Amino acid sequence: DELVARSKSAHAQNQVNEAIKSVNIMDPSSEIGRFEEKVRREEARVRGAAELQASSLDSQFESLEDLGEQTEVEARLAALKAKQTDALES
């Protein structure tokens, strides 16, 4: 009876160890590990999309600033040409 009980105890302990091993988060084959990896990938994807959006906004603002500078230069040039034309006509 004692040997049978020890055998069953050893078998149960083995099953417990196997169950604990399958729940190991660091084990890439475990369900929890795969789920955690999926969540990490999704988080990285969201961070990447935010970075792209931010850089896109930055480039749009830079192009607007460039356009503003161009418009200012063109306006000054037109004013200088107008002054020159007025001076020549006088």
Image: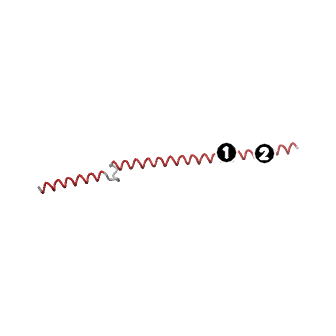
| Position in image of residue 32 (x %, y %) | 35, 49
Q: Looking at the rendering, which quadrant does residue 89 occupy?
A: top right
Q: Is 52 left or right of 14, judged from the image as shown? A: right
Describe the element under mark 2 as helix, strand or loop: helix
Q: Mark 2 highlights which residue?
A: 79
Q: Residues within 10 Å of mark 1 (few under 14, many from 20)?
A: few
Give me the residue at 29% from left, 53% from top.
21
Describe the element under mark 1 as helix, strand or loop: helix
> Up-down: is 86 above or below 24?
above
What's under tag 2, amino acid-wise?
A: Ala
Give whichever of 6, 76 is nearer the camera.
6
| Position in image of residue 84 (x %, y %) | 82, 45
Give me the residue at 49% from left, 48% from top.
48
| Quarter of the C terminus within the rendering | top right
How many numbered discs, if any? 2
Give whichever of 25, 82 is nearer the camera.
25
Whichever of labels 2 and 1 marks the residue nearer the N terminus, that label is 1
What's under tag 1, amino acid-wise?
A: Leu
